[in-house]
Amino acid sequence: MPEAVAIDIRRYRPEEEAEPHWQRYDVPFRREWMVLDALNYIKDEVDGTLAYRWSCRMGVCGSCGMMVNGQPTLTCATYLESLLPGPIRVEPLRGLPVIRDLVGELSDFLAKLKRVKPWIEREEERPTAAGEYLQTPAEVAAYKQYAMCINCLLCYAACPIYELEPEFLGPAAIALAQRYNLDSRDEGHEERMDVLSTHDGIWACTFVGECSTVCPKNVDPAGAIQRYKLEAALDWAKSVVLPWGRQ
Amino acid sequence: MHSREHDVLVIGGGGAGLRAAIAVVEANPALSVAVVSKVYPMRSHTVSAEGGAAAVIKSDDDLDAHAYDTISGADWLCDQDAVEAFVEEAPHEMLRLEHWGCPWSRTPDGHVGVRAFGGMKIKRTWFAADKTGFHLLHTLFQTSLKYDQIVRYDEWFVTRLLVDGGRCQGVVALEIATGEVHALLAKAVVLATGGGGRVFPFTTNASIKTGDGMGLAYRVDVPLKDMEFVQYHPTGLPFTGILITEAARAEGGWLLNKDGYRYLQDYDLGKPEPEPVLRSMELGPRDRLSQAFVKEVEKGQTIETPHGHVVHLDIRHLGARVIDTKLPFVRELCRKYEHLDPLTELIPVRPVVHYMMGGVDTDTLGATTLPGLYAAGETACVSINGANRLGSNSLTELLVFGARAGKAAAAYAASVRSSTPAARTLAFDEERRLRGMLGRRGGERLSALRTEMQRAMEAGVGIYRDAGGLESAAASIRDLQDRARRASLDDQSLTFNTEIVALLELDNLLDVAETIIYSALARRESRGAHQRTDHPGRDDEHFLAHSLAYRAPDGPPRVQLRPVTITRWPPGERVYGR
């Protein structure tokens, strides 16, 4: 095992410099350290100006996604050891505007998330006195995988379409739309389909599948998008063949 | 300086904050409500809660049973009127969450499933596998998006409460992305910023848990209540402090010492049975289990590792089916962070700082002593948790008291006039203070000060305490407060300056640390999570009372006592396993 490892970080401070540049830090190597631990070492011991986000350090809050050696990565869940011998290159997530250093702008994702109505839509909300909606374990399993999204946006960084078509809703937002569509308590499917079947909804996706490859929670957004396309195509076919079939 | 005005401000976008914001809209859709959070709401620490949320829903259960478990678990230090309101509204709130889409684990017939939990005599803990907090938070966040009345200020850090004319009229906040300072004026403010576990070095708490709401309230002379009660969760992973949920024991996991012996049987917690027994052994309360661990260390019956003494959590006998359906996150965390598979290997664990029973003093509606200021969730102390919180009561508490605080804040906001000019003047003062911090040079690194604080707290204010240890921790904290005022920053940028945020957080942490220590000194008895080796035993005659720490202009806080509210359950012995 090495005693130290070099970390190259893409720095950008808009008040101080016009262009991003690379800065190298040598950090001690420890077997139990994640990439995030190395960043915290730099921040605490070497250079307090380094800016990045982190919080739970257990792979569930979704804050600390970055490009590590070119791959979208949750830095709290990736060992330094897996990246030896280095140097390890750390950059902000691809595809998001950079605010500073390793911090990307999330507002585009949040606007898109709201567009797909990620909540239970019902004609009438049941009073709590009437108890819970029954949902068998199989009915839970139908949507549960898509409910595991931690909004870390690694899938957006991996998606070649999002980079080219900024209007594309993107993998996580579509997976979360599907999460509610497949929930037996929900009645908002039609409304969501209207959002999703526009050009910037699902059709931009060419099924590269990178989103599902990088997802740290096995959400499989690519699968969600494919299901949607199939359904939208069937819907369309129905409306052509049976014009009265879709009210 | 930019200034904006809302009817209600909610500080914090975790479970309590989001529930409060929705409650404001439900109570009065004409009100404008803003959620101000230093992180995007879905990053809030509610996300890390694992095991479940307690509420009476099954026919074999009743509200009094939930109340009794909570009160005895709390070592009688909670207010029983608050507990009664809590258990009564809990099922309603949990059903709201079910209707909003929370993916609760179900029984085969489609009803919500419940699991056992520590200190609970009847199974009443609803769960979404072992990521309950994650699902609860995302359900609330996504549901909040449907209300256009809820405005969000994401990644804004609140630095000060604006108080004039004897009421809270808003906050000053630093917009982290730009470094701009804003006055956010309001008729009512709800604090929902969570706990402050980061005063200690070894904690399950996320890095953002820096006691911000507690510090904000304390500095405007609102008392902090029962701060000496810090919960150690018995099963944290060594080195990282990552939580292994109590659900692992609820499903049948065992705690073993170095000889493979279920040592809890030696600590008046019952006899070992092959199947889990409610309110017994591994399903005892967290305070008792963490204290038993310390005794095992003293007896030399634990295992030494590079990251301290550990015992073993054994879930191998539960088998792959139970582990993969009910504890998948436990398996994922062990594999990722310990390089082991709990299906075939023992999990090393040790007690870890997890939760603060204390917090901003509120009544049962979430109102603090300052008109216009409310608090809910871990930031607040209502109190239902007393000297020891039961696992799975805190997520439910977020919902019940988040909703109550939101409703009360909405009613108050409709009854008062807009902010006064003096409140705006205060905001300018605060802007000047923040600008002054940026220029500081030549002082110590803030990370060094933070580490020193954490070490002092661990050394003097751990599971067992005495006057000498507490006094020396107090001296360290006072010294650190002086040095923190001179600490310097490497980072002089306005854009996304996380270092200035960390320095402001350090102020909050030091305030929280100070109140923990002085409240612990004042409580010369042992109760629940507060164990004084120099004052063993519970002393109901003198200390069946909340401690209230008030900031003093110079010197340490003033600590006063206030009797607890007893309704139907007179103080008794806490009995587990017999």
Image (cartoon, rainbow, N blue to C red):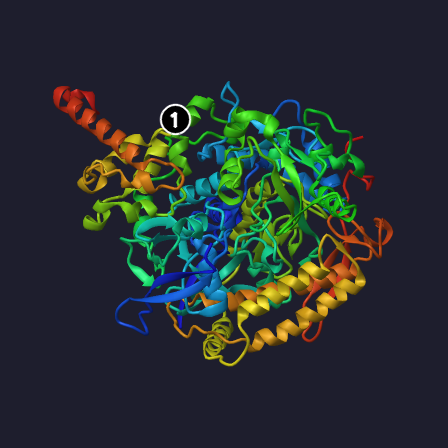
For the question of whether residue B67 can be seen, the reply is no
Image quarter of residue B492: bottom left
Quadrant of the rendering where the N terminus of chain B is positioned? bottom left
Q: Residue at x 54, y 67 (%)?
A: B447
Where is mark 1, residue-wise? A142
In the image, B182: left or right of B507?
left
In the image, B563: left or right of A212?
right
Q: Residue at x 75, y 37 (%)?
A: B263
Name the secondary structure under disc 1: helix
Looking at the rendered structure, the kind of residue marked 1 is Ala
Q: From this viewpoint, which residue is outermost toward the front?
A: A1
B444 relative to B561, above or below? below
Q: Which residue is nearer to you in this view: B569 or B420?
A: B569
Image quarter of residue A169: top left
B178 relative to B345, above or below? below
Image quarter of residue B115: top right
Q: From this viewpoint, which residue is outermost toward the bottom?
A: B442
Q: Which residue is nearer to you in this view: A190 or B500?
A: B500
A27 relative to A94, above or below? below
For the question of whether residue B532 can be seen, the reply is yes
Residue B198 rendering spot, x and y as whole percentages: 58, 58
Residue B5 rendering spot, x and y as whole percentages: 42, 62
Q: Chain of mark 1?
A: A
Q: Which residue is nearer to you in this view: A227 or A4?
A: A4
Residue B348 rendering spot, x and y as whole percentages: 62, 42
Q: Residue at x 42, y 69 (%)?
A: A49
Residue B159 rendering spot, x and y as whole percentages: 51, 67
Count residues near mark 1 (Cα–Cα under 10 Å), then give few for <14, some for 14-19, many for 20+. Answer: some
